[in-house]
Amino acid sequence: MAKITMMNSLLSLVLVFFIASSSVIAGSDSPFIVAHKKATLNRLKSGAEKVSVSIDIYNQGSAAAYDVSLSDEGWSSEIFSIISGNTSTSWERLDVGAVLSHSFELESTVKSVFYSTPAVITFRVPTKAALQEAYSTPLLPLEILSDKPRENIFDLAKVWNTLFYKLLEKIWTNVKCRF
């Protein structure tokens, strides 16, 4: 009899947990914004480097986000000048599962290591009065006009080729020794 009572209470506890979790899930109809920021460097001429920045904004939530705005003001005007595009923009809405992309280009003539701040995304949720905020992924430090040589893909291929042939030679000698 004690086992049945314990089993009933355990079943009741699982049922209560299931009902509570489903009501929490049903009540969480809101956008979930994920933003990925990336930058690539391209040496234009001696003394100048172009930085191409792109930011992708994803809505992984269960509701649309409205009045979405992006601001990426972390680029120092002492180091960078804008070549094309804007560092901020806005959209009317971001649907569930949709992606918004924004890009701009900067130019720098100052040699430095630059640490960029994450971009800020603000959006409105219909069920909440206050604006919501999300941040993009941070960038790795950008080495503007660095003296270190760029890696050449052909040099890497030569290294892999040499290693591959040494490995084949070792395998071949091991096979010859066995026979």
Image: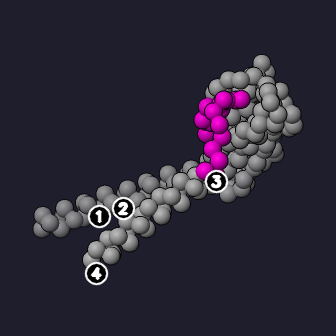
> In the image, residue 5 lies at what x, y percent?
18, 63
14 or 32, which is in the foreground? 32
Between the C-alphas of marks 4 and 1, the distance is: 68 Å
Q: Which residue is mark 1?
A: 11
Q: Quadrant of residue 109?
A: top right
Judge whether residue 54 can be spotted in this image.
Answer: yes
34 or 162, which is in the foreground? 162
Which comes before the other along the chain, label 4 or label 2?
Answer: 2
Q: Is residue 133 magenta?
A: yes
Q: Which residue is mark 4?
A: 179
Label 4 or label 1, whichever lies nearer to me, is: 4
Q: Residues within 10 Å of mark 2 (few under 14, many from 20)?
A: few
Label 1 or label 3, whichever lies nearer to me, is: 3
The residue type indicated by label 1 comes to: Leu
Give the dominant element type of the magenta stretch: helix, strand or loop: loop
Between the C-alphas of marks 4 and 3, the distance is: 38 Å
Q: Which residues are magenta?
A: 129-155
The residue type indicated by label 4 comes to: Phe
Q: Which residue is mark 2?
A: 15
